Image (cartoon, grey):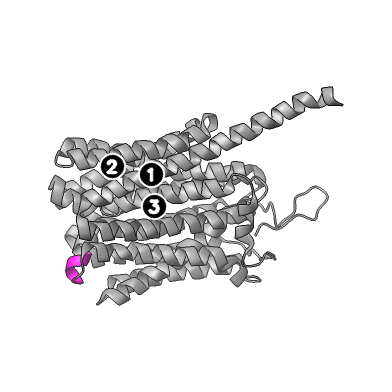
Amino acid sequence: MTVQSSSPSGQDDLTTPPASWSAVFALSLCASTLVASEFMPVSLLTPIATDLHLTEGQAGQAISVSGLFAVLTSLFISAATRGVDRRSLLLWLTVLMLLSGVVVSLAPNYMVLITGRALVGMVIGGFWSMSAATMMRLVPASDVPRALAVLNGGNALATTIAAPMGSFLGQYIGWRGAFFCVVPIAALTFVWQFLTLPAMPNQERSGAAAAFRVLRRPQVPYGMIAAALFFLGQFALFTYLRPFLETVTQVDVSMLSAILLVLGVAGLVGTSLIGIVLRARLYASLIVMPLVMAVIAIGLMSFGASLVTTTMLLALWGLIGTAAPVGWWTWLATALPDDAEAGGGLMVAVVQLAITTGASSGGLLFDVSGYQATFLFSAVILCLSAAVIWFAAFRRRAKSASSARSKCRSPASS
């Protein structure tokens, strides 16, 4: 999606336009609203299930459906919208986000709820697939890292407040009112983007299968599998925190909101600090993070009845789990420095498919065997993620050592 420069200096108006920081902040607000829409059901599963006469596992499928549509959209939106100005596309996606809030908040039954969640899934896949390339076209190359930080800051902020805010609002205005709160924010986002986003003609020529070509690169398949396992394990547990806290830890709605806020604030801290660790120990971090989260899952099974211990464990979960996506996007940039856009589309699909599978499988286990089966499943999958990325790191080191030995021998053999 990034337009190649034809100027002698390697920069033109399409690749490095004058900075439009107002547009960057408008997209950051869009990201915050979108993430809040995506994860709000986590704190509202119980009232949704009660009102629509569903099991909590069935209500959890609302997250699964949005993930499925995000997968399909992220893989094919670039090919399906060739020739469409990216400004217009982003505005239409924002309209879909607004429409999703209306449909979900007014849903009279399960099928209408699922339809609304499918709409927000389309927005998730489309927005995040284009996000990095859009930043590259809004600001000069030297400012792209800062613009991406602003965008991800909106993501982290929404992750921090979405669950506790949803729980708090649901207590006073109901789950429908909580979802409807997205609508005026989406409308504000639309107006802000309409006023600030410049025209961004699309000149992408890649086909529908372009995202899959990166799988031919060494290390990429292992990394994608490890990332899929990580997010699958994470959301198999995270999706069902509310019923766990209400039935095992036995908290009321106010305490539930406080615990989720602690989890979110810890995640914001983790996101702020993770960059320091990743610069020095990228692969080690990707191995250690899922292992620690697996231990937390087992700890919740053992000490879930203790409010203090559970809160501490969930704070650590938030510290790691919210920061982990930064690690995976850093890995992507390292593994595909010259093809990060195609890899980004595939990564969005992998992550959303993993979230879908995690929420679905976790809900099935929760309904059939209770929270213990769900949390144990999460722990096992997270350990598998660590094992796969360890194997990838081992192969990478072995290949580097073999290459170094070959270079050392080459002068003598010549």
Is 254 positioned to the left or the right of 43 in the image? left
Q: CA distance from mark 1 to mark 3?
A: 8 Å
Q: Nearer the viewer, residue 84 or 291?
A: 291
Q: Which residue is mark 2?
A: 297
Mark 3: secondary structure: helix
Residue 66 picture location, percent across and down: 39, 65
Residue 314 seen from this side: no
Task: Determine the image quadrant of residue 274.
Answer: top left
Indicate yes or no whether the magenta region holds residue 337.
no
Q: Residue at x 59, y 72 (%)?
A: 80
Disc 2, SS: helix
Mark 2 or 1, nearer chain start: 2
- Alpha carbon distance from label 2 to label 3: 13 Å
Q: Nearer the N terminus, badge 1 or badge 3?
A: 3
Under tag 1, what secondary structure? helix
**Crowd class of label 3 (few under 14; some 14 to 19; many from 20; radius 10 Å):** many
Residue that extends furthest to the front in the rendered view of this protein: 413
Percent position of residue 389, x then y: 49, 40
- Whether residues under marks 1 and 3 lie with C-beta atoms below 8 angstroms apart, the answer is no
Circle 3: residue type: Leu
Residue that label 1 marks: 382
- Tell me whether the residue at label 2 lies in contact with that at label 1, contact meaning CB atoms closer than 8 angstroms: yes
| Mark drawn on residue 232 | 3
Which quadrant, please, contains the C terminus? Answer: top right
Q: Which residues are magenta?
A: 48-53
Residue 63 sits above or below residue 320 on the image: below
At label 1, the amino acid type is Leu
Q: Amino acid at mark 2?
A: Ala
